[in-house]
Image (tube, grey):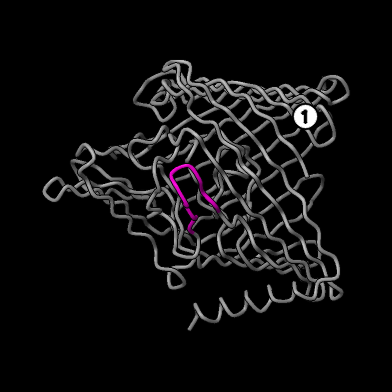
Amino acid sequence: MKRQSFAFMVMTLMSQALWAVDVGLSGISRWNSGYEINTGEWQTNQLAIKPEIMARFDGGTKVTAKLLARWDLEDKLEPGRPAQPFRSGINRRIFPDNHTDLELRELFVDDYLGDTFVRIGKQQIVWGQADGLRVLDVINPLNHREFILPEMEDRRIPLWSAQVEMPMDSWSLQLVWVPDSTVTESPEPGAAYALLDDPFDGAGKLTVDRPKAFSESDYGARLGRYWNGWDLTFNYLYHTIDDPIITVDPAVRAIRASYNRSHLFGVTAANAFGDYTFRLEAGYESERQYASSAHGLQSTDELSYVLGLDYSGFTDTLVSGQFFQSIRDKGLDVPHTEENATLLLRRDFMNQVVQLESLLIYSFDNRDALWQVNVDYQVATNVILNTGANFFSGDREGQLGRFQDRSRLNLGIELGF
């Protein structure tokens, strides 16, 4: 009944678009080529078309649809037609052939009930102050098709969900409900950025025990306010942790991905002091499980935080640094702490016609790193040429160093319409 009621509510709101008085179409098409330095082969040659349709009508309601059509000539990022075991039935993509995938990225309705803002449909819900390193931005799972190389907006998997935002004196309250059971999507073994190993040389069977839709929904609340120059939020989320717990059963050649649920309590704070901006994001998970070959599943609570400092005192330049740490119980078969740092340099040239960006991500635990360099040249209002590189380095046992053979040079063009 809950499933049918939710679907009926969404379809009823979507049907209002038929009476729209203003319909607009925009979007981008992007060609990107990636050439692997070590192998001397093309990793990807892909065209992505992302149309966005927006319909407004007299009552103030707005309907937004975002689509994605993508063709990849190389078929190395997601070989063949993936089975999509990490996605719920209502959130799956279409693979007409080995080189093409089609997706309804987002489809949501916006409206106001008095001073209360309501958004219902397939969407991204973003929490937190950190860039790239997730502490509170965990409502939407991620697609690791190209690992962590794309922008976060392109990596998040939009979910069928609802959010409500309402003013409360000097505070604002956001409530979220996510019945969609999709979890973080890892490419299957054999893909360029496969995160799951198959110890059975292709003969293993992967089982993904996703949470149950509706009965194991995620839900939460965020309180926010501006106080004495500080932008503050206080967050709570009861959710499924989207990163899989991987166990292997050699007897039946089974690889199992399971998940645990947890209470997440968090806080963010940001303030500007002249040319400096300080950012803090912290989150406490009540339970996080890890798989151990010697001890089975191990549970721990976990505290994670990000400290960020941005400097904009140089002309047309931003310098941003972040430090990330996670702290777990001692005595586990995983490290007691985990530390990462990022350094971002961004500079505009020629009155913002050219933008140079350099991002370094470094893991102190495995001493591995990812360095991304990108240059955008805006040829015209709706035409951007792009070139850059992604360099992986360090210990092959690390999450970044394991892909050092995947370092690549990039070349692309983006057209707006």
**Which quadrant would the C terminus be assigned to in this image?**
top right
- Residue shown at the point (54%, 45%) measured from the top left: 135
Question: Could you classify mark 1 by the number of other residues whose Cα lies within 10 Å: few (under 14), some (14-19), or many (20 or more)?
Answer: some
Q: Nearer the viewer, residue 88 or 284?
A: 88
State yes or no: residue 96 in magenta.
Answer: yes
Between 101 and 388, the one nearer to me in the picture:
101
Q: Vertically, is 228 above or below 125?
A: above
Q: Nearer the viewer, residue 221 or 383?
A: 383
Q: Which residue is at a point 69% across and 45% down the rendered structure image?
A: 269
Q: In this rendering, would 182 be left or right of 16?
A: left
Q: Is residue 8 above or below residue 78?
A: below
Residue ID at (24%, 42%): 292
Name the amino acid type tagged 1.
Answer: Tyr
Residue 272: quadrant of the picture:
top right
86 left or right, relative to 225 = left
- Location of residue 362 with respect to 148 vertically, above or below: above
Residue 219: name its quadrant: bottom right
Residue 96 on image: x %, y %:
47, 52
* Residue matched to label 1: 276
Is the stretch drawn in magenta largely helix, strand or loop?
A: strand
Image location of residue 40, percent across then percent down: 45, 16
Element at label 1: strand
Residue lying at the far left in this picture: please name it. 251
x and y percentages locating residue 379 in the rendered image: 81, 27
Q: Is residue 54 left or right of residue 253?
A: right
Give the number of marks. Answer: 1
Q: Which residues are magenta?
A: 92-102
| 49 falls in the magenta region | no
Tell me residue 133's x, y (percent). 56, 38
- Residue ID at (44%, 57%): 87
